[in-house]
Amino acid sequence: MKLMIRETPKGLQAYVAKKDLEEMIVETEKPGLWGGWARLSNGWLFEMPAFDVPPALPTSVEARRLTTGED
């Protein structure tokens, strides 16, 4: 699923274009966003791609949704 990630005054925010959904990233598996999972404020969990050099924000990435938050 394509996620657009951007920095806001409140923290990192993800936009899921196919769902027209904009949610804050509230938890990550690793200290940085990349290479682990990231949880959105609605409960969805995404496997984030790993990068040797983190991309500049805002950026679009392909991420796999692990849960819908209702599991």
Image: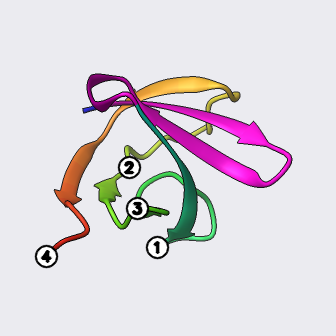
Mark 1 or mark 2, earlier in chain = 1
Mark 1 or mark 3, earlier in chain = 1
Residue at the image point whose x is 57% and y is 67% from the top: 26
The residue tagged 4 is 71
The residue tagged 2 is 48
Between 58 and 21, the one lying in front of the other is: 21
The residue tagged 1 is 29
Q: Is residue 6 left or right of residue 46?
A: right
Q: Quadrant of the N terminus?
A: top left
Cα separation between marks 4 and 2:
19 Å
Image location of residue 51, percent across then percent down: 49, 41
Residue at the image point whose x is 62% and y is 30% from the top: 55
- When the figure is inspected, residue 46 is found, relative to residue 60, above or below; the finding is below
Q: Amino acid at mark 4?
A: Asp
Q: Secondary structure at mark 4?
A: loop
For the magenta stretch, what is the residue range?
A: 2-20
Q: Is residue 47 left or right of residue 65?
A: right
Q: Quadrant of the C terminus?
A: bottom left
Q: Secondary structure at mark 1?
A: loop
Q: Main secondary structure of the magenta part?
A: strand
Residue at the image point whose x is 55% and y is 57% from the top: 25
Instruction: Please name which of the two marks, 3 or 2, marks the residue nearer to the observer.
Output: 3
Between 52 and 15, the one lying in front of the other is: 15
Q: Amino acid at mark 3?
A: Asn
Q: Is mark 1 in CB contact (under 8 Å) with mark 3? A: no
